[in-house]
Amino acid sequence: MSEKDQSFSLIHTPHGQTRPNEESDTKFSFTNFSKEFDDHIDKSIRGYSTLRQDVLSISRYFVEDDTTVLDLGCSQGSLLRKMYENNDHVTNTEYLGVEINDSFQQHWKDEDRLRYIVDDITTMEFPKDLSLVTSLFTFQFIPERKRVPLMEKIYDNLIEGGGFVFSEKLLSIGGKVQNMMEFMYYDYKREHFTEKEILDKEIELRHLAKLTNEDLLIKQLLGVGFRQIQTFWRNFNFVGMVALKLPSNNWDKK
Ligand SMILES: C[S@@+](CC[C@H](N)C(=O)[O-])C[C@H]1O[C@@H](n2cnc3c(N)ncnc32)[C@H](O)[C@@H]1O
């Protein structure tokens, strides 16, 4: 890039760092990036580390003794481990991470109450005492026809007062804003990836990631029983939300 180009460039290159170049390109797949997936996702989604920090903070409001915390699509398992290590107000809570891709196993280290398994979240049975379910950017990789049954399974296995904390990349309401969001996002991604890597990943994601929109997502969550669905984090079209399973209406039974 010439000096003149650089002065007009929207691409911020932190001091002392060089722009990414195509020689070091790696084709995107969860398996190819399983060794350093945390680092990859941190560079791919602006503010991802603050999202994780927020999920960790929120977890404290839900994690209870005699319950299980479930992380869906846990990849390296580091978020679940942080929740396990930080929630020191509990003594017997179980933590379970589920991931369909076994190449992430190299990162997992089970502890007394912390366990990781390779399984498919759409077909496996969930523990019935869930106080908190987390799912960061996993639903978008689940076939659309399987999402509502999965939401229902989460809801049914949460205890009353339990929470579902998730993040997703959403589509904007209108084409004009979608176009802005997408291209501002590419501007950001060019700080860490070459143009070829960005476009190649888009091609890989075509058959993997099927994005939804906020309206449909909220209707689906309400439809299976969740209430007080609230966005707590947002960056471009990446959102973090919390949805509650309220205590049942059992005060007027008698
Ligand atoms: C975008 S990654 C996010 C990973 C992790 N939650 C994070 O924030 O770093 C989505 C993950 O979901 C996993 N996944 C996709 N479909 C799944 C399924 N049916 N069952 C379990 N895991 C699944 C993928 O293998 C991948 O690791």
Image: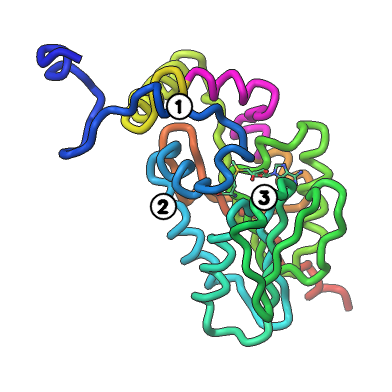
Judge by depth and name the residue closer to the eye, 143 or 249. 143
Tell me how far mark 3 sits from mark 2, CA to CA. 17 Å
The segment highlighted magenta reads 199-217
Is disc 1 in contact with disc 2, using a CB cutoff of under 8 Å? no
Q: Assign the N terminus to one quadrant of the image.
A: top left
Judge by depth and name the residue closer to the eye, 70 or 170. 70
User: What x and y, as percent, mark residue 96?
Assistant: 70, 66
Tag 3: amino acid? Gly
Q: Would residue 244 be counted in the magenta stretch?
A: no
Q: How many marks?
A: 3
Circle 1 Cα neighbour tier, 10 Å, few/some/many (<14 / 14–19 / ≥20): some
Residue at 31% x, 30% y is: 191
**Marking on residue 124:** none
Instruction: Name the residue carrying label 1.
Output: 25
Horizontal arrangement in the rendering, residue 162 relative to residue 123 (left or right) = left
**Circle 1 SS class:** loop
Is disc 3 in contact with disc 2, using a CB cutoff of under 8 Å? no
Tag 1: amino acid? Asp
Query: To which quarter of the image does residue 248 belong?
Result: bottom right
Instruction: Name the residue carrying label 2.
Output: 49
Horizontal arrangement in the rendering, residue 25 relative to residue 154 (left or right) = left
Nearer mark to the viewer, of 3 and 1: 1
User: What x and y, as percent, mark residue 72?
Assistant: 69, 53
Tell me how far mark 1 sits from mark 2, CA to CA. 23 Å
Residue at 55% x, 21% y is: 202
User: What x and y, as percent, mark residue 189?
Assistant: 38, 29
Circle 3 Cα neighbour tier, 10 Å, few/some/many (<14 / 14–19 / ≥20): many
Tell me how far mark 3 sits from mark 1, CA to CA. 25 Å
